[in-house]
């Protein structure tokens, strides 16, 4: 699947898992454990959301948290934000924002 042409919303869970592992390795290489460890924890949170909710909700949570992470280096993505999870799960229209 050509994710670059289809957009991030079309990535499968298997492709996401492979990509997340690659991103974790590069983050460790370039930024050290201070940034890679919280990112790994964030990825575990995304997988938890997938098990409890569904892949679409997990994708939205993942994207929103990563955007926040990129804009604010003080943000700790390792702590799951239950309010955002509830918002994503309770608002099916939010899935069209992918």
Image (cartoon, rainbow, N blue to C red):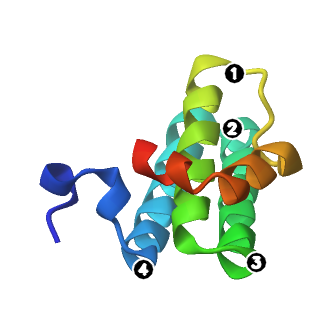
Spatial separation of the CA atoms under disc 1 and disc 2: 9 Å
Please tell me the numbered disc located at residue 14.
4
Q: Secondary structure at mark 3?
A: helix
Q: Which residue is mark 3?
A: 52
Identify the mark nearer the N-term, 4 or 2. 4
Identify the mark nearer the N-term, 3 or 1. 3
* Residue at the image position 59 percent from the left and 34 percent from the top: 31
Q: x, y percentage for residue 42?
A: 71, 53
* Residue at the image position 67 percent from the left and 18 percent from the top: 72
Q: Nearer the viewer, residue 90 or 75?
A: 90
* Residue at the image position 56 percent from the left and 26 percent from the top: 70
Camera-near label (1 vs 2) is 1
Q: Is residue 87 left or right of residue 95?
A: right
Q: Secondary structure at mark 1?
A: loop
Image quadrant in which the N terminus is located: bottom left
Q: Which residue is mark 1?
A: 73
Q: Nearer the viewer, residue 86 or 12?
A: 86
Q: Nearer the viewer, residue 64 or 83?
A: 83
Identify the mark nearer the N-term, 2 or 3. 2
In the picture shown, does residue 14 fall above or below 93?
A: below
Q: Which residue is mark 2?
A: 35
Spatial separation of the CA atoms under disc 3 and disc 1: 28 Å
Q: x, y percentage for residue 79?
A: 86, 47
Camera-near label (3 vs 1) is 3
Label 1–label 2 contact, CB within 8 A: yes
Q: Residues within 10 Å of mark 3 (few under 14, many from 20)?
A: few
Spatial separation of the CA atoms under disc 2 and disc 3: 26 Å
Q: Residues within 10 Å of mark 1 (few under 14, many from 20)?
A: few
Spatial separation of the CA atoms under disc 4 and disc 2: 23 Å
């Amino acid at each position: 699947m050509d994710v670059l042409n289809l957009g991030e919303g079309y990535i499968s869970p298997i492709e996401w898992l492979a990509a997340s592992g690659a991103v974790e390795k590069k983050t460790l290489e370039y930024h050290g454990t201070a940034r890679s460890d919280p990112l790994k924890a964030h990825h575990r949170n995304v997988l938890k959301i997938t098990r409890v909710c569904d892949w679409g909700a997990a994708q939205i949570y993942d994207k929103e948290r990563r955007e926040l992470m990129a804009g604010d280096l003080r943000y700790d993505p390792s702590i799951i934000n239950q309010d955002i999870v509830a918002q994503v799960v309770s608002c099916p229209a939010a899935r069209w924002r992918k």
